[in-house]
Image (cartoon, rainbow, N blue to C red):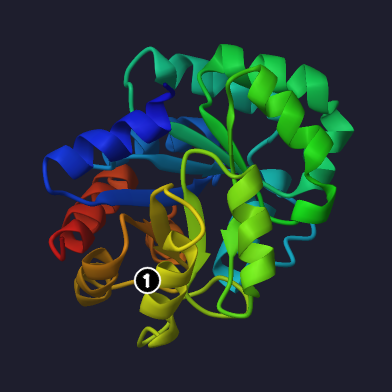
Amino acid sequence: MGRIISRFQQLKQEGKKAFIPFITLGDPDFETTRQTVMALVESGADLIELGVPFSDPVADGPVIQRASERALNGGGFTLHKALRLISELRQMTEVPFILFSYYNPLFAYGFEALIRETKASGIDGFLITDLSVEEAEVPVASMRRSSMDCIFLAAPTSTNERITKIARYSSGFIYAVSRTGVTGVQKSLSDEVSLLVERIRQHSPLPVAVGFGISTPEQVRDVARVADGVVVGSAIVHCIQENLGTQYLAEKVGAFTRWLRGGM
């Protein structure tokens, strides 16, 4: 059993829900990423999504787009350097790591080689935003041979037929998107969230985590009432952006994470 599902099972036994922060690797540089990941761990992150910077992040809003730009333009980002950093971080924590990416940079790296290297570095699974279930059979088979989880997105617009396919190819957990559109902070969560979580549970026994737009302890609390996990991305990346160049960036991110987790 992998670290991802083990963590969800442990939390369920304790009557708790998973808090899952997202950051962009190399934003604004690798040393800051190292410090920020450890601040997230110390602030109670149950799993961590590590985003691969990409020049055309079509599913992401302006906050994460700017983070990708900072990593690519100023942070000296390469996947090889990122995996080396992840290997070092894995020596410091057992918190599950999920590599969050678009398919293009993974394909360009060489997917089979990447799976071997990510496994060795300590990555536990992939969330590939633009990998459709219709094209998932070969990549998912490669991941499963290496005991890597593959997490798929389900949206409010997903039909029951599509959710069935998502359930077939998913492992670890299923990511329920709280709204249609791109990532980014929103003032309130749609009533569709609980309906979507219930629909997913009718098709899969896997845990369900909800993300996109969650930015306050109240929203964290509302999602934790209906889902098994809460994903926060843009709000945390915005905290990084607001503290660029300061000595206490990682501490600020840690404090912000603890504030958000207070909703749970």
Q: Residue at x 31, y 43 (%)?
A: 250
Q: Is residue 215 left or right of residue 13?
A: right
**Residue 1 visible from this viewpoint:** yes
Check the image and report above or below for 159 versus 80.
below
Q: Residue at x 21, y 68 (%)?
A: 225
**Residue 42 visible from this viewpoint:** no
**Rendered location of residue 185, percent (x, y):** 44, 77
Check the image and report above or below for 205 versus 189.
above
Query: Which residue lies under the disc numbered 1?
Result: 214
- Residue kind at label 1, given as amino acid type: Ile
Quadrant position of the N terminus in the picture: top left
**Rendered location of residue 45, percent (x, y):** 28, 42
- Residue 223 found in image quarter: bottom left
Q: Is residue 110 left or right of residue 237?
A: right
Q: Is residue 103 left or right of residue 181?
A: right
- Residue 219 found in image quarter: bottom left
Q: Secondary structure at mark 1?
A: loop
Q: Residue at x 20, y 76 (%)?
A: 218
- Residue 169 found in image quarter: top right
Q: Nearer the viewer, residue 246 or 198?
A: 198
Q: Residues within 10 Å of mark 1 (few under 14, many from 20)?
A: many
Image mark count? 1
Check the image and report above or below for 187 versus 185.
below
Q: Nearer the viewer, residue 147 or 255?
A: 147
Q: Is residue 76 left or right of residue 251?
A: right
Q: Residue at x 64, y 17 (%)?
A: 146
